Image (tube, rainbow, N blue to C red):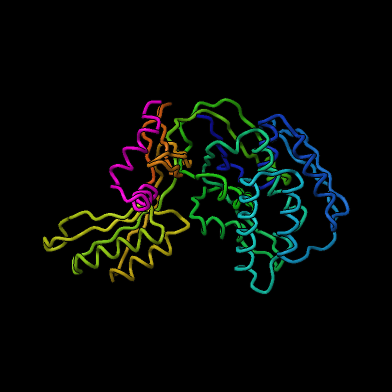
């Protein structure tokens, strides 16, 4: 299965570095020129042009050369509206527009937390930020990489002194660190005393890729190298991207919550499991065990993601009264899953049934209709769930298809 790897372990990541690396990988700069023209047409932009040049940063790499003149930045709402206008102008898909919105939301949230009196224009400029967000998304979409799994290694954040709108602080860049913390992204060490990962780079990584602690097993097909615009003392910082073939088992990261329960009733445990699933847990289950003083205990385990784990942690403690919860984030390999709604004739009528198809090792291994859909059909027709399941199964492709 085709996949994209973003590798910022050595040189960090920024929006322009990722765009340059993707342009180097795909061999196409036309989407960047199209985007530059759309940004230049914004009311507050007096000049915007972009070019792609070749540099030697230890390896041959591409670097963006941008010329920008603009009026002072407006409000958060103005920036979001301008981002949406440009995304629509260049024909970015729903996938791209949604991710662009999430990246900008992460940037603004980090800046508001770090600068409560007003976000820093140093970190969130207008035309420059719009380009840094949209350029990688547009390149991925134009090359078909937006339809592939995106993996990443931990980014090097850098150190030294970082200039912000309110003064100089020690590295890494506070907003980049804030975004990595919000998304629980592991980071890499670097001896370089400069900013390597920008806030925009961190937000792009958080919203595009599954970040793992290791370089994934893959068969490389082609590579691309994007250079930063500032010297690092030994040349320039380099971001590497790799397109390759990976197993069609998809790697994702899950958050696991776990606690031991030894002094609550089964009814309370059952209610807690129900609440956790209602609040967005991927799974929740009980494992019997023996605890301290050889007392029987129940180990309650909850699987979730970064987005929901804080809320589920609160639900778990509220419903069980546990005094401590173990939290760990782990990668897992899962079958590639596709969900679609199929029209199924049952009892002289046609119903939409959501179906999940799972693939692994190049073949379909499971086709599973949505239980809630079948239960609703059974109620509407006044027949058993088993009869509905039989009819649905007759119209589904079998495993191995």
Measuring from the top left, give residue 9's x and y in whole percent: 55, 42
Give the residue at the far left of this rendering.
294
- Between residue 377 and residue 367, name the one nearer to us: 377
Question: Going by the image, does 214 lie left or right of 133?
Answer: left
Q: Residues in magenta? A: 373-401
For the residue pair 243 and 89, the one nearer the viewer reads as 89
Q: Quadrant of the C terminus?
A: top left
> Residue 277, position in %: x, y?
36, 58
Estimate the x, y position of residue 99 in percent, counting from the top left.
Answer: 61, 50
Q: Nearer the viewer, residue 270 or 115?
A: 270
The answer to whether residue 233 is visible is no
At x 56% / y 35%, what residue is drawn? 4
Left or right of 157 on screen, residue 261: left
Instruction: Residue 40: say if magenta.
Output: no
Q: Nearer the viewer, residue 272 or 327?
A: 272
Decide if residue 104 is on the left or right side of residue 359: right
Taken as a whole, is the magenta stretch helix, strand or loop? helix
Q: Residue at x 48, y 55 (%)?
A: 184
Q: In this view, does 276 lie above or below 335?
A: below
Q: Which residue is pictured at 67% across the width and 30% down the height?
A: 26
Q: Is residue 79 above or below residue 66?
A: below
x, y (%) of residue 104?
Answer: 65, 57
Question: Residue 81: in sight, yes or no?
Answer: yes
In the displayed orientation, state which residue is furthest to the bottom. Answer: 117
Q: Which residue is drawn at 31% across and 61% down?
A: 274
Compared with residue 305, is residue 365 higher up or lower down, i.e. above or below? above
């Amino acid at each position: 299965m085709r996949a994209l790897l973003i590798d910022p372990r050595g040189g960090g990541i920024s929006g322009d570095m990722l765009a340059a690396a993707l342009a180097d990988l795909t061999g196409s700069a036309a989407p960047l020129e199209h985007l530059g023209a759309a940004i230049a047409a914004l009311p507050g932009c007096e000049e915007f042009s972009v070019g792609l040049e070749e540099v030697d940063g230890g390896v041959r790499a591409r670097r963006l050369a941008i010329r920008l003149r603009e009026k002072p930045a407006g409000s958060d709402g103005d920036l979001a509206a301008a981002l949406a206008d440009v995304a629509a102008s260049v024909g970015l898909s729903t996938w791209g527009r949604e991710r662009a919105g999430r990246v900008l939301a992460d940037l603004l949230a980090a800046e508001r937390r770090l600068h409560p009196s007003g976000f820093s224009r140093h970190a969130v400029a207008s035309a420059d930020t719009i380009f840094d967000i949209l350029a990688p998304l547009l390149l991925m979409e134009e090359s078909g990489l937006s339809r592939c799994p995106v993996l990443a290694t931990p980014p090097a954040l850098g150190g030294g002194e970082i200039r912000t709108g309110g003064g100089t602080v020690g590295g890494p860049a506070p907003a980049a660190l804030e975004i990595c913390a919000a998304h629980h992204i592991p980071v890499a060490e670097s001896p370089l005393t400069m900013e390597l990962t920008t806030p925009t780079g961190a937000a792009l990584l958080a919203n595009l890729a599954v970040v793992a602690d290791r370089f994934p097993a893959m068969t490389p097909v082609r590579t691309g190298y994007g250079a930063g615009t500032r010297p690092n003392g030994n040349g320039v910082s380099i971001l590497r991207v790799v397109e390759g073939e990976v197993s069609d088992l998809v790697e994702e990261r899950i958050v696991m919550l776990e606690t031991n329960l030894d002094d609550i009733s089964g009814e309370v445990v059952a209610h807690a499991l129900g609440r956790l699933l209602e609040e967005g847990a991927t799974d929740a289950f009980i494992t019997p065990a023996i605890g301290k003083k050889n007392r029987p205990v129940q180990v309650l385990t909850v699987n979730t993601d970064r987005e929901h784990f804080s809320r589920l942690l609160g639900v778990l403690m509220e419903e069980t009264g546990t005094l401590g919860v173990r939290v760990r984030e782990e990668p897992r390999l899962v079958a590639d899953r596709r969900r679609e709604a199929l029209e199924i004739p049952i009892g002289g009528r046609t119903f939409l049934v959501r179906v999940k198809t799972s693939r692994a090792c190049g073949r379909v291994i499971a086709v599973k209709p949505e239980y809630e859909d079948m239960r609703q059909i059974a109620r509407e027709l006044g027949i058993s769930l088993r009869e509905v399941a039989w009819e649905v199964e007759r119209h589904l492709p079998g495993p191995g298809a």
